[in-house]
Each structure stands twice: as C-alpha cells, then as structure tokens.
Image (cartoon, helix red, strand yellow):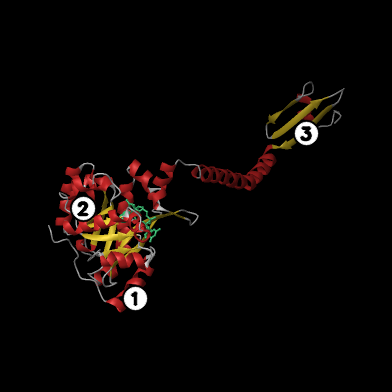
Amino acid sequence: MLIDGVNDPVVSFARHHLHNDDGGIDGERMFASVVGDGVVAVASEQSKMVYGQLRRELALFLPVGLFIAAFIVVMVVVFSRGRLSPRAELEFAIQKRQFIVHYQPIVELATGICVGAEALVRWRRRDGSLVRPDLFIPLAEETGLIVAITDQVLDEVVRELKTVLVGDRGLHIAINLSAADIKSGRFIDMIAEKLQHTGIRNEQIWLEATERGFIDVDAARANLDRARRAGHSIAIDDFGTGYSSLQYLQGLPVDALKIDKSFIDTIERGAATSSVTLHIIEMAKELGLFSVAEGVETEAQAAYLREHGVSFGQGWLFSKPLAAKDLIEFRDASVAQFGKAPEIIRADKW
Ligand code: C2E
Ligand code: CA
Ligand code: CA
C-alpha cells in the first residue's frame, strides 16, 4: 500500500510503523506491516473480529483434538496391556474375574450313579479363548495368586450349582486346593463364609489336595483334620506321582485316594506299572479309604477297576468336563437311569 496523506485508520497505523517490519495490537486493531523498497505493506483488522474467528475455530477443532488424544491414549493402553508380564496378566484376570469353571462328573463304578463332579477352572480371556489350567496354575501357585483363584472357583460353584446342591444332598462338588491353601488352612473359613446362607452343606464340598501340599506335614495334618471336622471329605489328588506317598499317608486324615491317570492308562496295555495300579488300589483298601480313578477312557479300564473294587471313576468314558447347565442335564439323566447318590460318602476309619 502506498502511504499518502489520506486520513484513513489503516494509514494512520502504517505511519507509526513505517520503518521496520512490525506486527501486534495497537488499540482495538491488530496489524502487521512489511517494509520493502520505498513501499510499506500493512494489514490491519479489528481485534474482536480476529478473536471471534479464533473462538469459532477453537470450538470446531478442540473437540476433534481431544478425541484424537483420547484415541491415542486408549491405543497405548490396549497395546501395553497386550504386553503385560504373565504375572500382571494373571492379576488383571483375577481383578476382572475372568475365570470360569467346568465340572467333570464322578460316578460310582458299581452302579453308574453320578455322585458329584470335580470343579476344574478355566481362564476365559477377553477374546473368548479358554486357557487350560496347567498353563496358568503353576504361575498362580508360584506367585501366591492361586489363593484368589480358589476363592473365585468356590464363588462360581455356589452361584451356578446352589439350587441343584440344595435340592440333592447326595451331590458333591470337589474343589482343588493349592499347596498354599493346605499350608495356611485359610480355605476352611473361606468356604464356611461363602456357604453361609446358601443352604449348601459342608459335606457337599469335597476337597482335593496334592502331595505338594504336604511338605509341611504338621500344618497339613492340622488343617485337613479341621476341614474334616467341619464336614468336608478329603481326597489325595494325583496319588502315586509324588515321592513320599506311604510315609505320610497313614497319619493324614483323608477319605479317598485319586489314582492318577498315568496309572489308569497302563491298565489295558499290561505294562509293568499296571502292577503299581493294583498296589495302589490294595493300599487304599487296607487303609480304609475310597479310591477314585482319574482319566478313565475305556470300558475295559472301567471293568478292571470295578472288578478290583475301585469305588469311583472320572474320565471321558463317562463325560468330559461340562459347563454347569450341561452338568445338571448329565446328573438329571443319571438320576433317571441309575437313581440318586447316598447323602454322605466318607471313609469310616476316622
Ligand atoms: P487334575 O486335578 O488331575 O484334573 C484332572 C484333569 O484331567 C483335568 O484336566 C481333566 O480335564 C483331565 N481329564 C479328565 N478325564 C480325562 C480323560 O479321560 N482323558 C484325558 N486325557 N484327560 C482327562 P484340566 O481340567 O486341564 O486340569 C488340569 C489340572 O489343573 C488339574 O489336574 C489340576 O491339577 C489343575 N486345576 C484345575 N482346576 C484347578 C483349580 O480350580 N485349582 C487348582 N489349584 N488347580 C486346578
Ligand atoms: Ca483334581
Ligand atoms: Ca488329578
């Protein structure tokens, strides 16, 4: 713009800023000027017009900006979750109660009656996939998180099976205890608390303890004794796979031995270890305990176990682990075919 003597507000601005490149606010106007070869270019606008425009742009772009920022934050969280340590992932799963329980029926071999089921935990991840317990139980035991998982399993048993357990006192659910549970004994009060006001009896909750839980044998004996006196029946799980079987067995207050699948597998094959299977069966009888055969897959195995006086069986021959509603169906069909189970199944020796 050429500067002449015209009394224009823009020109009067320009007169103030003739000699340098400049810009800023002067009174109510905003301006910018550039000095060239004998020429000064000046742009000027009322401040309130500029601010008005700015506010309109802010109203448009601020929400968009916030949305993009939030999206980035969410993506970072999701991405970093996927990369949590296995322990942190397990903690998250506990916090979000991502555990579900399947139930594998236990049948009386002589009659076919369904006397109960074993509660087997599964981890249902956010994508819907199920993780097998042997992939996370060892880590849960190592980190002490197992205790919270035992609690959640019992919560599920109560929630899903309360009605059927109250309606049929001959039905039992076996819960797997961890070594930490057996050592501390905390599970006894935990179960009592969770069964309170449900109508489920302590006698309907069986407990399975592995030999890993007996390292501190005095604590184990005291806690199992207390659990039995509260009404629970106790089975030694995976029997025969540990080292010190006979040593501690006589002094432990238990009702049943669960014969590990690896011994049941040898039955038809006539393998040398099948004589060990027979030995375990005899030992249970001599000690006045029930035996439960795990992983029974064929009719020949069932016939052999029946013939040798094994009381109960569990395995794919009878059923795979089932969701609660399918277990109830299985049990109803079993009652229709073979009748109901007796109320209490306990070893008489104690
Ligand atoms: P377990 O207590 O010895 O459970 C028996 C396992 O054998 C189950 O595997 C069951 O699905 C499987 N099984 C049963 N019948 C058959 C059969 O006929 N053939 C074959 N091939 N397998 C059969 P699952 O459910 O994968 O459980 C694995 C282990 O994880 C359990 O072994 C138990 O030690 C542990 N576990 C499961 N649920 C819990 C829980 O709630 N707490 C704790 N502490 N441990 C658990
Ligand atoms: Ca078990
Ligand atoms: Ca077992």
As rendered, which of 83 and 312 lies closer to the eye? 312
Percent across and percent down for residue 142 are 34, 41
Q: CA distance from mark 2 to mark 1?
A: 33 Å
Q: Residue furthest bottom?
A: 336
Q: Residues within 10 Å of mark 3 (few under 14, many from 20)?
A: some
Question: Is label 2 in a helix, a strand or a loop?
Answer: helix
In front here: 282 or 161? 282
Judged left or right of residue 192, residue 127 is right
- x then y, percent, for residue 50: 69, 40
Q: Quadrant of the C terminus?
A: bottom left
Identify the disc placed on residue 188. 2
Q: Determine the quadrant in which ligand 3 lies.
A: bottom left
Question: Which mark sits nearer the N-terminus, 2 or 1?
Answer: 2
Seen at 16% across and 57% down, the residue is 286
Report the residue marked by disc 3. 43
Q: Can residue 160 be seen here?
A: no
Mark 2 vs mark 1, foreground winner is 1
Q: Is residue 167 above or below residue 65?
A: below
The span from disc 3 to disc 1 (Cα, nearest Å) is 91 Å
Q: Which residue is tagged 1? A: 333
Secondary structure beneath disc 3? strand
Residue at (69%, 41%) from the top-left corner?
49
Comparing labels 2 and 3, the label whose residue is closer to the camera: 2
Q: Amino acid at mark 2?
A: Ile
Sooner in the amino-acid sequence: mark 2 or mark 3:
3
Q: Quadrant of residue 323?
A: bottom left
| Circle 2/circle 1 CB separation < 8 Å | no
Q: Is residue 64 left or right of residue 97?
A: right
> Could you tell me residue 7's position as x and y percent?
81, 32
**Label of residue 5 in the image:** none
Residue 140 place in picture, x, y as percent: 36, 45
Between 314 and 10, the residue placed more toward the observer is 314
